Amino acid sequence: MIQKENEKFSPSNIFEGMTSISALLNSQCENDRRIERIWIDRDKKDTKAKEIGFLNAKARELGFDVEYVAAEKIDKICVGSSHGGIIAFCTERALPALATEKIKADGFYVFLEGVEDPYNFGYTLRSLYAAGVDGVVLPPRNWMSAAGVVARSSAGASELIPMFTASAEDVLGIFKSAGYQVLCAGIRDSVSVFDGNFLYPVLLVIGGEKRGISRKILDQADQIVRIDYGREFRGSLSAASAATVMAFEIYRQNRKK
């Protein structure tokens, strides 16, 4: 178990399960990741006939191999246990650098700074995708090297949502030059996300639980926004929980648009 826990932090482009694999195959965003081969548990040929038919058709279309192997061979290299007997070996995904011309004129983007766990990172991406976020910007050092874990924890959203890289020094300037208001999640000098009027275009900046958002970014924000709690509580929400609440509240305010 300890070895499996440590493996979640290791670079891996092995996608586990049909949810992650299907998301990659159906991705319509700028995503150059490709499947090289797929392993299928040979004992699941009958129970997974529909999925196998889909994968074989895609294999002919895209040129990757489909192999039938023993279940033990799959379990040995997987971090999780919910793969359902199907895994894919994939190439890395190159994230493009953020540029003004890549940003929608009236969109909703999120910059994630300092999320320190690949599962939490994946859960965050899942929520942002569901909330209709147009794209996610990441610092150069991020969890996309652990792509298999991130894809599984995000239910495939990591492969469906447009993503870019930019340094903390550059990201705010690029979005402000495109006419965006910049919101940072925080407490000091903040307004409640439930009371503000945050109409698109919006860039929301969310930091990790341990380090939060850098002072340099906070000082340049148009507004600091907080989440009001339903009772006295001195703890902080996880990055995934905070991202979920804030992203859906901003979506709620803009949904008629």
Image (cartoon, rainbow, N blue to C red):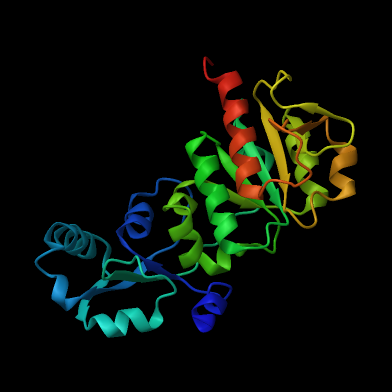
Query: On the picture, is 210 further left or further right than 106?
Result: right
Query: On the picture, is 130 further left or further right than 239?
Result: left
Quarter of the image for residue 180 reads top right
Residue closest to the eye, 144 or 196: 196
- Residue furthest to the front: 232
- Residue furthest to the top: 256
* Residue 88 shows up from this direction: yes
Residue closest to the eye, 7 or 90: 7
- Above/below status of 127 relative to 68: above
For image coordinates 46% across by 66% down, the residue present is 148
Quarter of the image for residue 61 reads bottom left
- Quadrant assignment for the C terminus: top right
Residue closest to the eye, 2 or 112: 2
* Residue 32 shows up from this direction: no
Where residue 194 appears, x then y in whole percent? 69, 23
- Above/below status of 245 relative to 97: above
- Above/below status of 123 relative to 44: above
**Tally of marks:** 0
Quarter of the image for residue 41 reads bottom left
Query: On the picture, is 218 further left or further right than 247?
Result: right
- Above/below status of 202 relative to 28: above
Where residue 46 appears, x then y in whole percent? 9, 66
Where residue 107 appears, x then y in whole percent? 60, 29
Where residue 115 appears, x then y in whole percent? 68, 57
For image coordinates 70% across by 61% down, the residue present is 140
For image coordinates 38% across by 56% down, the residue present is 24
